[in-house]
């Protein structure tokens, strides 16, 4: 593992620093995390993980992140890297995330998951891994978004069923899953506030002659375009009035800082599956 001081001189990490692996280090969010670790005083980059078939294997993680070369090469061997680390931050794909969580469970490490698009079976495997690993999983790691989720739950609980709930999200044109993990997180918060299951009340698309809106539905609308980092709005539309809660992300670094905050928090916890609401003390809000 390696770090650079502000003078860009190489030094070994101190024992006090948390040694983290970035899984998905070649992607947009992974590169942002590598940079965030380089800029933070409490962390050191212990490894950079990518799919073993990636053409980026062997590249320097610092170079890819736009920081000085740090000597940490992208690798496809998660187990070897994790042995020398305190934990990992995973921003990959569902199958890779499940494999990384199992590896973290085997070694009893901290594992921060920002991957979205996991299915029910994959979610179950993550939960099983949390029996021995300290896992924090969130569709969005930012403080603002998690506060928005807490507010959404509270507003949904406060307002009666005459207020229809709609969630609108927009992301860049390269995002592959829809609705976004954050939009689904907000939908679950709204459903929890209402005391219902999102699976039974979610409307993901509308096309053609749909008929009138069913009372109690939680609707989702998805926009894709340009380089938008992430925008989410929860709309509570009632008779003659409307309440809108909005969060707009201008830089991926907010997610990276949130993930590092979660890792440091998880380091002192017992094994289990946690959310950012737990990290930020919002669970009982």
Image: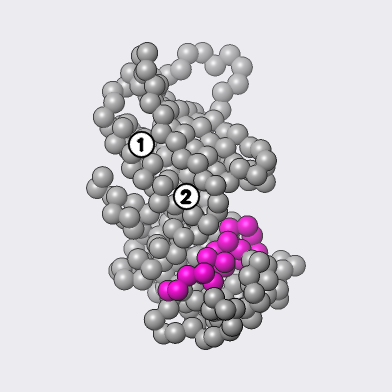
The image shows residue 25 at horizontal and vertical percentages of 61, 66
Q: In this view, does 215 lie to the left or right of 65?
A: left
The image shows residue 158 at horizontal and vertical percentages of 26, 29
**Magenta span main SS:** helix
Residue drawn 33% across the image and 55% down it? 280
Q: Can residue 226 be seen in this view?
A: yes
Q: Which of the 4 quarters of the picture holds residue 155? A: top left
Residue drawn 33% across the image and 42% down it? 150
Q: Distance between the residues labelled 2 and 1?
A: 15 Å
In the rendered structure, which segment of residues is drawn in magenta? 24-42
Provide the residue designation for mark 2: 139
Q: Which of the 4 quarters of the picture holds residue 95? A: bottom right
Residue drawn 72% across the image and 68% down it? 56
Q: Which of the 4 quarters of the picture holds residue 107? A: bottom left
The image shows residue 6 at horizontal and vertical percentages of 54, 75
The image shows residue 197 at horizontal and vertical percentages of 36, 35
């Amino acid at each position: 593992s390696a770090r650079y001081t502000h003078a860009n001189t190489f030094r070994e990490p101190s024992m006090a620093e948390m040694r983290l692996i970035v899984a998905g280090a070649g992607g947009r969010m992974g590169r942002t995390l590598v940079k965030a670790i380089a800029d933070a005083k409490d962390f050191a980059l212990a490894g950079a993980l990518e799919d073993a078939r990636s053409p980026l294997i062997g590249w320097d993680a610092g170079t890819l992140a736009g920081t000085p070369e740090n000597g940490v090469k992208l690798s496809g061997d998660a187990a070897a890297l994790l042995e020398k680390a305190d934990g990992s931050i995973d921003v990959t794909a569902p199958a890779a995330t499940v494999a990384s969580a199992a590896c973290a469970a085997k070694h009893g490490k901290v594992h921060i998951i920002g991957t979205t698009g996991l299915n029910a079976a994959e979610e179950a495997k993550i939960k099983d891994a949390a029996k021995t690993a300290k896992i924090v999983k969130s569709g969005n790691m930012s403080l603002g978004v998690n506060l928005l989720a807490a507010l959404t739950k509270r507003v949904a609980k406060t307002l009666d069923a005459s207020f229809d709930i709609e969630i609108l999200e927009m992301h860049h044109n390269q995002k592959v899953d829809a609705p976004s993990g954050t939009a689904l997180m907000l939908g679950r918060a709204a459903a929890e506030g209402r005391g219902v299951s999102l699976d039974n009340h979610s409307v993901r698309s509308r096309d053609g002659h749909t008929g009138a809106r069913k009372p109690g539905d939680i609707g989702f609308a998805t926009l894709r375009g340009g380089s938008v980092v992430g925008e989410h709005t929860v709309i509570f539309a009632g008779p003659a009035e409307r309440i809108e809660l909005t969060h707009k992300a201008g830089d991926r670094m907010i997610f990276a800082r949130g993930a590092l905050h979660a890792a440091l928090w998880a380091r002192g916890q017992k094994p289990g599956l946690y959310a950012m609401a737990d990290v930020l003390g919002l669970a009982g809000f």
